[in-house]
Image (cartoon, coloured by chain):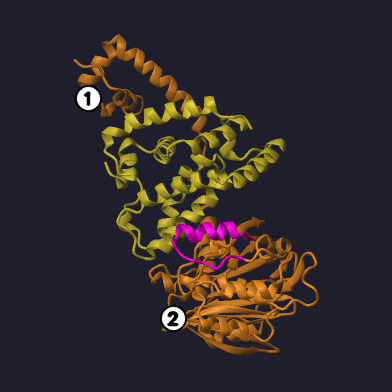
Chain colours: A orange, B yellow
Amino acid sequence: MRHADDGTLRRMLDEEWAVRAGVRRHVAECGHCLERLGLIRDAERDARRLMEAPDGHLDAGQALARQRLLQAETWGAAIALGQPPTRGRLRWATGLAGFLTLLVLLAATPVGGYARNLLLIFEPRQFTAVPVAPGQVRSLIGLQNLGTMQDKGSSRLTAEADLAAAQAAVGFRIATPAALPHGLPAPSYAVLAQATQSLTLDQRKLASYAAKHHISLPPMPKNISGSILHVTTGPAVVISYGAAAAQLPRSQRMPPLVLAEAPVPKVFSTGAKVAEIEDYVLSLPGVSPELSAEIRDITDPTRTMPIPVPMAQVTSATVTLGAANGLWLQAKGQAAGGVVWTSGDRVYAVAGTLGKAEILSIASGLR
Amino acid sequence: MSLEETGRPSIRQVRTFDELFLMEWPRVVRVARQITHSQSWSEEVAQEVFLAFYRHFGADFPERPGPWLYRAAAHGALNELRGEGRRRVREERDARVWDRGAPDPGDLVATREEIAELRRSLTRLKQGEATLLALRYSGFSYNEIAQTMGLPVGQIGTRLRRAELRLRKEMDHAPRG
């Protein structure tokens, strides 16, 4: 009989029953096969010792609660961008603003001489809808192609046991609803740590992107390439009441009620003349003249964050919440919607499937 | 034998994402842990896997979602290891935990230095080799490995043997530090 091959000998170590009886008998009586089996066993033991990782404690229920929060966060970004968001976009957007955030921060008018090191150039106090045509966001050149992005801090949600634990984690008093509809499930709490992301604008990286995609791009001016933009976000808290119904299409999945609160994000710049950067970025392919005009029309660009709204899928409206103005966003033909606004130095969002009137009432009653 | 004949509920009985999550969570974490050798890190990878699954399929599950989830867990964990910055941060954190005398439960068998070296070595294997090792040492049968990786079951022994030899070779030649 022929000698057993290495694969068969290897399987004998794990699933001897699966190897034919005739082969097993041969191996038991064949010095050559037994010697090879010994070598294979030694290698298996060595690999097992290295690879072995005993089970730790797993709490699938707790993990599922965290998963629901991640999905809720994903949904928030999806409604703003009109498409399923990627992890990279979420990191930059912290849920709501996409590429256009950069356009606006670049369009920002600095207060004083911006040649000084690390100027605060953007600190949003209100939100405004910027209509975008289908496909327009997708046609924009991704931030990651304009330079090198770096993350500092965690972009992951951490589940917290209760309100007190969440408050201790974020370090500020969390506003809670004055009243809630009857029958809502108990809330779950999660916290997103403070994070800083930076983008170092880099002509070489952009040129490499252009070469790879066979497109022609205007060269980045020398005084822009090398500038660093820092975006500081969080810490943020997300309070979720109940879970999304899994049988719904994914675009409609959202818990009945989700609240979020964070300090307003801040953007700092190390150098280049902002007006030049603005002109350059708005001249890149994918930015239509209409979109460019919308961005330039924002009266206080240092304090207004644009939310790109795909006209075909999402409706938007300005709403009044006490002394503040909020931006209401709702996917067309669906129950889910949400409102985002700022008050003091905080940004708030309330969203869910409860309906516009209920959600605005809860938003107005946050204390 | 199919993946549904291993004592777990048949996927046909799973109606919602939540049921699928609760059923598959331990196994997805285990596959990721064979690669990261860190309990907390593997849970983070598993969360991303389920999030990607949710985005990709919505409510329209494939009949057998297991293979997709297990492959994604192995590939996701390998991608994490390939991010040098993330790996170093994690190893520094592991070191602090070890110094306090309370190791991550996933880090109990090999030494800390071996685990750091193992992580680097796994990234140098072919993705299929590392995935195969993760599945086998997570307790997958040869039939389950074949289904997950879309390979003939008769090839698994040979490929496993080759992957174990490659791992040893990479460990022996791994630059220190």
Please name the amino acid that badge 2 sits on: Gln
Q: Measure the C-alpha gap from mark 1 to mark 2.
A: 61 Å
For the N terminus of chain B, the quadrant is top left
Mark 2 Cα-neighbour bin, 10 Å: few <14, some 14–19, many ≥20: some
Both marks 1 and 2 on one chain:
yes
Q: Label 1, on which residue?
A: A20
Percent from the top left, x then y, of residue A203?
Answer: 60, 60
Q: Amino acid at mark 1?
A: Arg
The tag on residue A91 is none
The chain letter for the residue carrying disc 2 is: A
Left or right position of A223 against A356: right
- Residue at numbered disc 2: A313
Residue A96 showing in the rendered view? no
Taking the magenta stretch, the answer to whether it contains residue B136 is no
Horizontal arrangement in the rendering, residue B126 relative to residue A305 (left or right): left
**Is the residue A273 above or below the residue A360 in the image?**
above
Q: Which residues are magenta?
A: A201-220
Q: State the residue in front, A148 or A179.
A: A148
Residue A126: percent from the left, percent from the top?
Answer: 66, 82
Q: Position of residue A274 (x, y in %)?
A: 69, 73
- Determine the chain carrying the residue at label 1: A
Q: Nearer the viewer, mark 1 or mark 2?
A: 2
